[in-house]
Amino acid sequence: MKAINPAILTRFAIIAGGVFAVCLFFRETVFSGFDLVPGDRGDARLNIYIFEHWWRVIQGKAYWLDPAYFYPTEHTLGYTHALFLNGVVYSVFRILGFDMYAAFIAAMMALCAFGYAGMFLLLRRILVVPVGIAIAVAILFINANSFFVSFAVSHPQYVTIVFLPWILYGMGLYWKNPDKLGRAGWIQGIATCLLLALVFYTSFYTGWFFVFWLGLASVWGVIFAWLRWGGVPCIQAMLSTIPKYGLQWLGFAGSFAVGLIPFLITYIPVLKLNGARHFESEVLGTLPTLFDFINTGHENGVWGSFLLALNPGMNNRPLAHEMWYGYPVLFLIAFAICLLVAIVNVRSLIHANVRTSFISNTQNYVIFALSAMATATFFLLVANFEIFYLWKVIFKYVPGASALRVISRSLLILGIPMFLCIALLAGAVFQNAIRFHSKKHRYALQSGVIILLSFFLIESLTRIQFARFSAGEERAFMRSIPIPPEGTSSFLITEVREAEIADTFAQIDAMIIAQSNDIGTFHGQSGMTPAGWAFFGIGGERYLANARSWMWRTGTVEDVYALDLETKEWSEFEAADLSRVDIEIGERVPGNSLDLFTRYGIQGWSIPEPWGVWNDGDVATLVFRLAERSQNLELHIERQFFLHPDVPLQQYSYRVNNQPVLDVVSNEAGDSKVDILPIPADLLNQSEYTTITIDFRNATSPLSLGTADDGRKLAIGLIALEWRIAPQ
């Protein structure tokens, strides 16, 4: 019988390893007959919505910056992850005829297979580790606890990490290329830089944390070079490369800059609008403690019970689920051994005597040492030591860090260098096993490595529910929604599904319904929201009042419909009941009252607060209709000022039906004051509706003054309105 070609067996093992890795990761989806969708009905469907947006952009049906949510706000793509690369993969399956849910499942599985291939190629072709170890570590990479948990807690956007091994692979190809200035060198460098830029545009967290880790590795590289060659020779060696490679590296930097243009166009306006995060209130609670480095969640099959016994209150913290990105105990011990090997053998690197190092290949030992040291440094920087936080320095001084909120997600990225270190150490064990003359001892050592890698996989498995909603049920729900009435420009939801348990889910229901019918929706879901948007608490006491306020502020009062998700019925929605003539003389309307929004069409005001409502912007309006328009009236506006040492007084003017009636210049602080607007009967009778416009000349945001993370442009706070007959 003819022996099977070993090369064929190797290829089969590589492919089988990839299939096993992907099927193990998506086991719940696979065993459900591909009905259960990874993630929950929150962020997973938000991902589907953004993916579908890119598919519509490719078809020419949508403008790339404007998904149809938070209507009519423009450039809303920057309110969340752009998910560009993931959306492109999703669109391939839409082209093939998959519906949105099937295309999402297929795209997620394809991306994970792509990540497996990237990690295998990086390990095998760049680091030249044995095939078996490359396959095993690539399987571990796809099934890492942090990666699995990111899906389970509804963050499938972090599938973007599958592109990172490919970036490292591209860097490795360029590094090993003897003819770097040739065509292949240029292609490798430009492609790698463009891919890195597009990773930023797909998931900012992923791109930023990865580049930050590369920066730490570079710093350690400079330190090692400095120790090896000395300061002056090190600088001279670096400068000597510029004449030969400077132009090429400038080209690489240019390609990265060009690739970042979509990212900058999308996010710079939003960052200017919303400003930086606040460290103590938003970021501090997301720094992982030392316990969280091993916190794989209470559902971990091997360590879950141990973790609960070690820290019974682990799940009682705010955002506790965001702390489950830790790594299994044995795996971290293995990385600690890698770090120890790197430290103990660093002398061999400095003195260029790699033969004394456990890892004898010079290139591999450099990568091993830099990866271990940079990763350990990253752990120290993100750690919450309770009494001090090194990350606060990073937050304050490193560009882009102040835009990050959940720092524990950085642990997703740190898995990659740890896998590289463990693969290199395991490969070195294999190579050193050859020294044993006894096959028994050699095979025992190699088998021990394989068993240990297998246990790393076992201790990463968790019982946490991975796929939490049915594609079939979602399809049935979408089929149950009637086509919107002809001429609908936008809509809002008035009642949620009968089985709905979260306001967030209803927001995304509205987004997908709007997208599927080519109309807008006032609803939206993201980490940021437009100023003045308050479509929270659907069906709550203030919900419709807040909705009407938004519509009048944004000028979207025409062709608006309401959808009851429980009855599946559409109805016309009146943005403001201006036809009512029940505004009485002598009636006092509090600024935080529902009446202010149901009986007055208002624009340029913020969200009601217990005391009243602030303006927001340079212009604010009130639109009303009175039964009594035959007499001269006065509108008494009780208000307070927004003042600051840099804004010592407020200056504004009132217009009634575009006619000036009152100018105010005042520095009154403290208790509320009253502006009295004289409104002659002839002004009231010019139109059935009367519009009062307030023009603010120095409205200022607390954010611009550095007093709070509040981007609203404030001038006056409206406490109450009262109509009176003007004195004769």
Image (cartoon, helix red, strand yellow):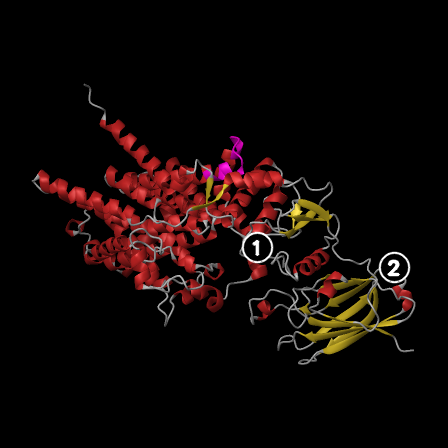
* Quadrant location, the N terminus: top left
What amino acid type is highlighted by mark number 1?
Answer: Asp
Q: CA distance from mark 1 to mark 2?
A: 41 Å
Relative to 230, residue 118 above or below:
above
Residue 490: % across, % down: 68, 48
Relative to 382, residue 253 above or below:
above
For residue 362, say whether it is visible. no
| Residue drawn at the location 43% of the way across and 46% of the way down | 159
| Residue drawn at the location 31% of the way across and 57% of the way down | 305
Relative to 5, residue 413 above or below:
below
For residue 218, say whether it is visible. yes
Within the magenta stretch, is there residue 100? Answer: yes
Q: Residue furthest left?
A: 437
Residue 614 picture quarter: bottom right
Residue 689 picture quarter: bottom right
Magenta stretch in the rendered image? 94-105
Chief secondary structure of the magenta portion: helix
Residue 368: % across, % down: 26, 50
Q: Which mark is residue 232?
A: none
What amino acid type is highlighted by mark number 2?
Answer: Ser
- Residue at image mark 1: 503
* Quadrant location, the C terminus: bottom right
Helix, strand or loop under label 1: helix
Q: Answer with left or right where residue 575 lies relative to residue 208.
A: right
- Residue at image mark 2: 687
Q: Answer with left or right where residue 229 lies relative to residue 646.
A: left
